[in-house]
Image (tube, grey):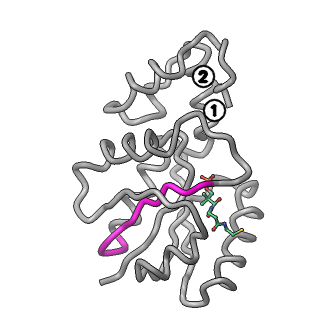
């Protein structure tokens, strides 16, 4: 059985993330969506909230599991017997950072491959931080996040831009 990990902050999960997760599942037998700590980011949603939102969005998908992990991705992949990391690439601007991460992960766990999937044209611009900013100012995010979590995200972030969660 081939297992892949889709890692990320998912703060919050977007339709772009969902597209990458479902395409990863077409390639691999089992997909672990790992909500990891990115030390360079302050998140608007807690780890538990991000996991819960993702679990709801993936509940209809067979062999897709959502977990939280605070540690190195390369170590977690080894523990879970995953052979690949799957990440979405939106534009060249993503590439430099993702390329560096893939080289770090390869050094830390030589058995682990990183597979990049390019995003679809309609998701090229989509980011969690953009979604948060639009929601904070009361804008319409229905085209950017799964409908099943839309109300929760809006309720949580729609403050008229008065809170500093507009990351
Ligand atoms: O969605 P993001 O924030 O771009 O995802 C980045 C993430 C969480 C995948 C990355 O920060 C990560 O792998 N964090 C775990 C710690 C780790 O393994 N770092 C890589 C070695 S520098």
Looking at the rendered image, the quarter that the N terminus falls into is bottom left
Please tell me whether residue 115 belongs to the stretch shown in magenta.
Answer: no
Kindly tell me whether mark 2's CB lies below 8 Å from ligand 1: no
Residue at mark 1: 130
Few, some or many C-alpha atoms within 10 Å of disc 2 (few <14, some 14-19, many ≥20)?
Answer: some
Q: What main secondary structure does the magenta stretch of the protein show?
A: strand
* Quarter of image, res 32: bottom left
Q: Nearer the viewer, residue 40 or 121?
A: 40
Residue 22, image x and y in percent?
Answer: 36, 58
Please tell me whether residue 29 belongs to the stretch shown in magenta.
Answer: yes
- Per the image, label 2 sits on a secondary structure element best described as helix
Residue under the image location 30 percent in, 42 percent down: 56
- Per the image, label 1 sits on a secondary structure element best described as helix
Few, some or many C-alpha atoms within 10 Å of disc 1 (few <14, some 14-19, many ≥20)?
Answer: some
Magenta region: 27-37
Residue 25, image x and y in percent?
Answer: 34, 66
Q: Indicate whether 129 appears above or below 1.
A: above
> Is 53 displayed left or right of 17 in the figure?
left
Residue 28, image x and y in percent?
Answer: 35, 74
Ligand 1 found in image quarter:
bottom right
Residue at mark 2: 134
Residue under the image location 41 percent in, 47 percent down: 51
Return the mark for residue 164.
none
Residue 107, image x and y in percent?
Answer: 69, 85
Looking at the rendered image, the quarter that the C terminus falls into is top right
* Quarter of image, res 119: bottom right
Q: Indicate whether 32 appears above or below 58.
A: below
Residue under the image location 70 percent in, 46 percent down: 41
Q: Indicate whether 61 appears above or below 141.
A: below
Mark 2–mark 1 Cα distance, whole angstroms, equals 6 Å
């Amino acid at each position: 059985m081939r297992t892949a990990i889709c890692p990320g902050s998912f703060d919050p999960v977007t339709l772009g993330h969902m597209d990458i997760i479902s395409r990863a599942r077409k390639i691999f037998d089992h997909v672990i969506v790992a909500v990891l700590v990115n030390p360079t980011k302050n998140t608007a949603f807690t780890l538990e909230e991000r996991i819960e939102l993702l679990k709801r969005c993936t509940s209809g998908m067979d062999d897709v599991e959502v977990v939280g992990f605070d540690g190195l991705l390369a170590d977690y992949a080894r523990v879970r017997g995953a052979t690949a990391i799957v990440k979405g690439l939106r534009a060249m601007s993503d590439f430099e950072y993702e390329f560096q991460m893939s080289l770090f992960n390869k050094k830390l766990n030589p058995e682990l491959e990183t597979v990049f999937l390019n995003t679809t044209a309609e998701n090229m611009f989509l980011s969690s931080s953009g979604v948060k900013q639009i929601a904070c100012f009361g804008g319409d995010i229905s085209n950017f996040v799964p409908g099943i979590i839309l109300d929760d995200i809006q309720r949580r972030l729609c403050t008229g831009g008065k809170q500093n969660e507009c990351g």
